[in-house]
Image: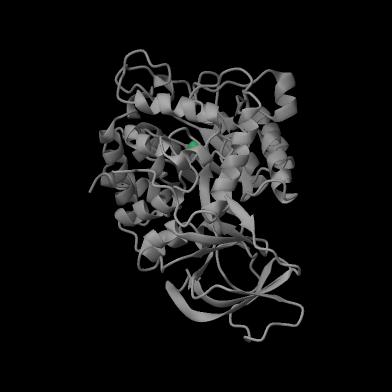
Amino acid sequence: MLTNVDFTSGKMLLRNARTLDVAGGKLLDASNVLIDGGKVVDIDAASAPPSDADVFDLGGLTLSPGLIDTHVHILSPYLTEQKGVPGMWTFKQMDRNCENTLAAGIVCVVDMLSPIKVLRRQRKKISAGKVNGPDVMMSGGIFSCQGGYPEAINPVPKAVGALVGQPKYQPQSPDEAAKLVNYLHGLGATVIKVGYTRLSRQLVDGRSLPAISDEVLTGVCDAAHALGLKVRVHHNWSEDMLHLVDFKIDALEHGVYDRNLLDDEIMALKNHGASVIPTLTINDSQGRFEEKLGFLRSERAQEYFEPQALEHLLWVCSTWTKFQGESYDGSFGYTRANRYCYEIEYRNTRKLFEAGVKLYAGTDCGAVVAYPGELADEILRLTSIGMTNAQALRAATNEAAEFIGRPDLGEVAPGKTAHLAVFEGNPMEDLSALRRVRYVMKSGRLMKTSHDELPEFWQGFTVLAPN
Ligand SMILES: [Zn+2]
C-alpha cells in the first residue's frame, strides 16, 4: 500500500540521493536530484533548492529507475479457468494488483492478454489518480485459433466483446488478422501477442492442438510491423520454437521445457534475432506452487487479494500435488507440480543467454501462481543463469524500456520521466535491496510504501530451484 508524501509544488529537490546508474553498472555518490514537471531535470543539482521547490531528504537511500515488468496479466482475478462473467470483486482485485505492483517499485508493465477496453478503463483510473498503479502498456487479446492455446480461454459473445474487448482473437485469414491488428493499435495496443503451442499441455497424451496457420501468422507479423508493433509469441515446446524461427516474430515468451535444446537449435534462435522473455518466475511457481502456501496464508496475502480470489488460490495451492479430479489441470497441464519441466527450461534459458540471445525480465504475474512484486525474484533468477547483477537490472530497466518502446523510462537521467523507486541498499552488490522498497515516484509524485519489505513469496523455501 502507498501513501502520498504531501508536497505543494510540482518541483522537488531530492537531497542526499544515491543514484543507481544502471547503464554504468554503479551506485553514484550522494547528490541532489531535481524533479520538475514529472521529469528528472538534474541528478547533481545545487544543494540550495530553487525557491519554488519542495525538499525531501532521502538520507542516502538508493534512487533507482522504477522497474519494468515486460510480461504481466495486471487485471487477473486469479481464476484458473474462464467461467462466465466475473463478479464485482474482480474490479477491486484489479485495483489491488495495480497498487501492489507500484508499491514494489514497478512503474511500468506490459499486459499480455487482458481485454483491451477493460485495460483502457483501468489506465484512465490510474492516470486520474483514482488508483495507484504503474503505466500499463498492452497487447489486448491473444491471437490464436479455435481450440488453440490458451484452450481454457474462449472469445466472449460479440456484444460483450464490443463492450470490454476480447481475451482471444481467432482470425481466419491474413486480412482478418490485419483488421484486428489495426483495431487493437487504434485502441492503444503497442504489442501483439500470439499464442502458439501445438503439443498438448498434457505432453504424454499424444494429442496435438491446432495453432494459428502459417499464412495468418505471417499476416499478423506484416500488419503489426507496418504499424511499428512488436509480435511476441507464447511458446513452450521445442518443435514450436523451431517452427517459429521461420517467421518475423520479435520475441518469444516463456521457454522450452519438453527437452534440452541442442546447440544448433539455440543458434537458430540466436541467428533469427528474436528476444526471449523467459518468465522463470511463473515456470518455477508452476513447478512448486505448493511451496507458496505459507505466503497465501500470511497477513500480507490478505492485502494482496480479495477474499474470493484468496479462497480460490488457497484451494488451488493446497491441491497442487493431488492430481485426482482437479479441474484446473487443463490450465497448467504437465508443468503443474513438475519441477523437471522447470529444470529443463532453466537450462535452456541459460544456454540462450550464453549464446547471446537478448533476454528481458518478465514475471507473468497474474497467471494464477505468480504475484505483484515477484519481479525482484525474477531479476535474481536472471543472475542464476549467468547474468551479472548489472545485466539483470538492465533487463528490467533501461534495456526493457527500449524493448517495450518507452525510452523515456529505465534511467535516472535528465529528461527522463520521473517514474522512480527508492531502495534501501545497493542492488548492484546485493539484489535483496530490491525487496526493500521505501518510496516510489510516479511522474514526480512521491509515495511512501507501508511495508519495509516485499512479502516473502516462498516462506521457508528458497527462490531459486535448480543449479
Ligand atoms: Zn502470460
Query: Which residue corresponds to the image point at 77% horizontal and 78% vertical from the top-left?
Result: 52
Number of numbered callouts drawn: 0
- Which quadrant holds residue 200? top left
Q: Residue farthest to the top? A: 325
Pinpoint residue 348: horizontal percent, then vertical percent.
Answer: 30, 44
Residue at the farthest front position: 299
295 relative to 341 in the view: left or right: right
Residue visible at 74% across and 20% down? 159
Near-viewer residue (220 or 336): 336
Q: Which residue sits at x=64%, y=46%? A: 190
Q: Is residue 245 visible?
A: no
Q: Is residue 244 above or below residue 197?
A: below
* Frontmost residue, 463 versus 467: 463
> Is residue 55 in view?
yes
**Color theme of the render:** one colour
Up-down relation of residue 419 to residue 385 (above or below): below
The x and y percentages for residue 399 are 50, 60
- In the rendered image, residue 321, in percent from the top left (x then y), is placed at 30, 25
Residue 47 position, x and y percent, is 62, 85
Give the side of residue 54 with respect to residue 313, left or right. Answer: right
